[in-house]
Image (tube, helix red, strand yellow):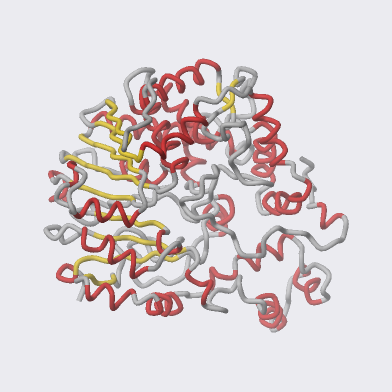
């Protein structure tokens, strides 16, 4: 791309045609598309040293992720375990969408079961997560993994599908799902279309002329080197450094396409950087001799591979069992309550992360279904939730949804004694749709404290009263994840992100974190803050 590149709508002096408004559209965790932006950077949902502390190093712990959409939080949590942790960790991962859930199962099988070296498995898992094509040897091993998980015989007539897989360590990978749910992903994994068909479908989506402004809007927010790197990824679909020969990648990654070879991702653009700590990505790249400013996609390849390699080593070192289920969350909570799952027969969890489940139901329903499953004996047991859409029923609660956002910005900037030339152009109405102005408007929520508005939302959801009736209480100070992205967990009184320009770019622009997403935590009343 040219150094002085500008979006077409700027060069053509026209209004851009975006398929969505200034608001960042974040998909729900049950959406089967690949490359979904979670809206936050991957986090450790145990925070063991901060909560249980040294006493937790010998404790057996059980955690539940009711609406997991990918592996990032799992990897971050396991990789953050203290090296001297000696307890047993059981992790229950659930998603009601069969495609999402079984995609995760295949990746974990390829990564964690004995076979290739840990380094080879980490590289394969990286490509299963982010590349549309695989080398023939990798594709062959994926077929082996599929047979290992699902078997070669039909499961028709069975009520449930069950699998138990060895890992490199003491633990195992277990899966329990309704048999009927496994059929669709199996059709995907056993499909026979060739790479040209899959690549054509991917390319058509990435180059869709109706989404050119959306695509260029994404590029316009990035640094020049990052822009060129992402643009190349849209053309190749393979997560590798610039210098690597892509010719061996001759087989389609069947986890990313339906049984007919049609792309199961967004139209217009995808960004594999979303959800990752870009500063950590850059540091990993430097250790591998890659300049992240010039090749951020190549940098991401080395970082994801390193994280997955570390994850695999932790699974080998510690006693960790991963339980993968595919049920409606309401049915799952009831099943756990009556002891349907032997590994969780006491229906007691030290952490429950319900994800964005409240956006598909209500906060009170989530608390009623899951709050009673918190471990009564652990004063640090916590239920964590987040909402991407809490502000939709509250007009004006966030800046980006406020139709007067630009007007307010202009009013405030006019009061400056020496407004910049770009702002003067806005006053003249000439550059209201310039990339810099669009970025400025989308960043306004960094300067707004949403806490009071979010508390009103929780009140409208009967969250506080429901929690009290269940013997739960809302945390005044969060223990697992800050109340919003961009605030350190230890900064108890901080309401707004306070970071350098570079860190803001890494978190909210390149990393795709959302400025309006809110997190809330609950624990048993006897253990909550006064």
Q: Disc count in the image?
A: 0
At which x and y percent is residue 250? 62, 19
Q: Is residue 159 left or right of residue 420?
A: left
At which x and y percent is residue 310? 35, 33
Instruction: Give the vertical position of 24 relative to 29 (above or below).
Output: below
Which corner quadrant holds the C terminus?
bottom left
Q: Is residue 165 left or right of residue 526?
A: right
> Going 34% across and 28% down the picture, which residue do you hit?
112
Name the residue nearer the viewer: 170 or 259.
Answer: 259
Residue 150, by quadrant, is top left
> Going 42% across and 49% down the picture, which residue do you hit?
42
Instruction: Give the vertical position of 413 relative to 126 (above or below).
Output: below
Query: What residue occupies the far front of the structure in this picture?
Result: 157
> Going 17% across and 49% down the picture, which residue do you hit?
339
Residue 147, by quadrant, is top left
At which x and y percent is residue 190? 50, 25
Name the residue nearer the viewer: 471 or 499.
Answer: 471
Instruction: Give the vertical position of 369 relative to 186 (above or below).
Output: below
> Going 24% across and 36% down the picture, which residue do you hit?
320
Which corner quadrant holds the N terminus?
top right
Q: Is residue 454 left or right of residue 209?
A: left
At which x and y percent is residue 504? 54, 58
């Amino acid at each position: 791309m040219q150094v002085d590149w500008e979006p077409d709508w700027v060069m053509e002096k026209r209004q851009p045609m975006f398929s969505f408004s200034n608001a960042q559209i974040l998909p729900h965790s049950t959406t089967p598309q690949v490359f979904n932006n979670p809206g936050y950077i991957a986090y450790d949902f145990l925070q063991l040293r901060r909560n249980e502390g040294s006493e937790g190093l010998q404790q057996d712990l059980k955690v539940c992720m009711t609406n997991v959409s990918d592996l990032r939080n799992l990897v971050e949590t396991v990789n953050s375990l203290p090296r001297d942790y000696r307890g047993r960790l059981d992790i229950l991962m659930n998603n009601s969408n069969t495609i999402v859930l079984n995609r995760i199962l295949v990746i974990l099988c390829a990564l964690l079961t004995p076979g290739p070296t840990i380094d080879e498995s980490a590289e394969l898992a990286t490509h299963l997560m982010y590349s549309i094509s695989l080398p023939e040897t990798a594709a062959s091993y994926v077929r082996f993994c599929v047979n290992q998980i699902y078997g070669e015989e039909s499961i028709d007539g069975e009520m449930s599908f069950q699998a138990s897989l060895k890992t490199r360590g003491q633990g195992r990978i277990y899966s329990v799902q309704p048999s009927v749910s496994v059929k669709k992903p199996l059709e995907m994994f056993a499909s026979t279309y060739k790479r040209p068909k899959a690549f054509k479908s991917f390319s058509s989506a990435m180059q869709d002329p109706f989404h050119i402004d959306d695509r260029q809007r994404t590029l316009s927010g990035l640094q020049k080197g990052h822009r060129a790197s992402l643009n190349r990824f849209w053309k190749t679909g393979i997560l590798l450094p610039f210098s690597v020969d892509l010719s061996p990648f001759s087989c389609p990654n069947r986890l990313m396409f339906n049984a007919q070879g049609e792309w199961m991702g967004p139209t217009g653009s995808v960004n594999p950087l979303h959800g990752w700590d870009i500063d950590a990505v850059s540091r990993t790249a430097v250790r591998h001799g890659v300049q992240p400013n010039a090749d951020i996609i190549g940098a991401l390849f080395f970082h994801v591979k390193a994280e997955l390699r570390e994850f695999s080593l932790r699974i080998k070192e510690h006693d960790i069992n991963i339980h993968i289920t595919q049920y409606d969350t309401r049915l799952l909570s009831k099943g756990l309550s009556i002891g349907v799952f032997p590994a969780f027969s006491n229906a007691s969890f030290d952490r429950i992360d319900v994800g964005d489940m409240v956006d598909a139901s209500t906060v009170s329903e989530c608390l009623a279904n899951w709050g009673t499953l918190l471990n009564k004996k652990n004063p640090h047991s916590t239920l964590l939730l987040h909402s991407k859409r809490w502000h939709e029923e509250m007009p004006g609660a966030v800046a980006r949804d406020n139709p007067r956002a630009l007007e307010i910005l202009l009013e405030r900037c006019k009061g400056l004694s020496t407004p910049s030339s770009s702002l003067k152009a806005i006053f003249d109405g000439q550059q209201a749709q310039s990339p810099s102005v669009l970025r400025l408007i989308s960043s306004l929520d960094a300067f707004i404290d949403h806490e009071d508005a979010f508390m009103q939302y929780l009140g409208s959801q009967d969250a506080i009263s429901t929690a009290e009736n269940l013997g739960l209480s809302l945390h005044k100070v969060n223990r697992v994840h800050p109340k919003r992205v961009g605030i350190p967990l230890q900064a108890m009184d901080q309401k707004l992100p306070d970071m350098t320009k570079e860190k803001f770019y890494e978190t909210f622009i390149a990393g795709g974190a959302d400025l309006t997403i809110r997190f809330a935590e609950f624990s048993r009343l006897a253990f909550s803050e006064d």
